[in-house]
Image: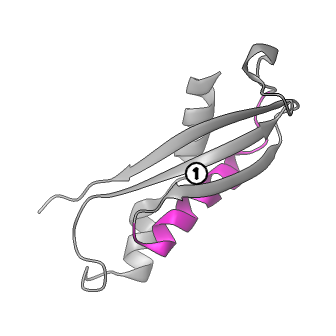
Amino acid sequence: YFNKMKSAVSRNWSPGTAIIVNDPMGTMYGRKDRFTKLRVFISSKGKLVKAKVITSSGVDFLDREAINAFKMAAPFAPPPEVLLNEHKQLEIQFGFMVTTHE
């Protein structure tokens, strides 16, 4: 289940494009590695209920890009019942790493 979710999200995540559009010369945010961690809630039917930043990369547009990747990848297959919390939702943390090479 998680591999399929990761694949769907990865297809919709474009940090390179976001960087080129928002900071093409690397002068505003610098050329350094960035990490965004989201807490994501998926309904028992596979609908994205919520995705929120719990660890910011320090760059708003990269954090937004991570959330948008989940929005664009949804809906997902219904999660296995055993993975649902007391609210009948799948609650996971999902990380996005942007690395730069100098």
In the image, 8 versus 64, the foreground residue is 64
Taking the view exactly as shown, the residue that stands out farthest to the top is 82
Q: Which residues are magenta?
A: 58-77
15 over 78 or under it: above or below: below
User: How far across and how far down the image is residue 84, in percent?
Assistant: 78, 24
User: How far across and how far down the image is residue 94, in percent?
Assistant: 53, 41
Q: Which residue in the structure is indicated by mark 1?
A: 12
Taking the view exactly as shown, the residue that stands out farthest to the front is 86
Q: Which element is circle 1 on?
A: loop
Question: In the rendered image, which quarter contains the N terminus?
Answer: top right
Question: In the rendered image, which quarter contains the C terminus?
Answer: bottom left
Looking at the image, residue 92 sits to the left or right of residue 58; the answer is right
23 over 50 or under it: above or below: below
| Quarter assignment of residue 23 | bottom left
Residue at 30% from the left image edge and 78% from the top image edge: 29
User: How far across and how far down the image is residue 27, in percent?
Assistant: 24, 85
The amino acid type, in three-letter code, at marker 1 is Asn
Looking at the image, residue 43 sits to the left or right of residue 98; the answer is right
Q: Verify whether residue 14 appears in magenta.
A: no
Coloration of the structure image: one colour
Looking at the image, residue 75 sits to the left or right of residue 93; the answer is right
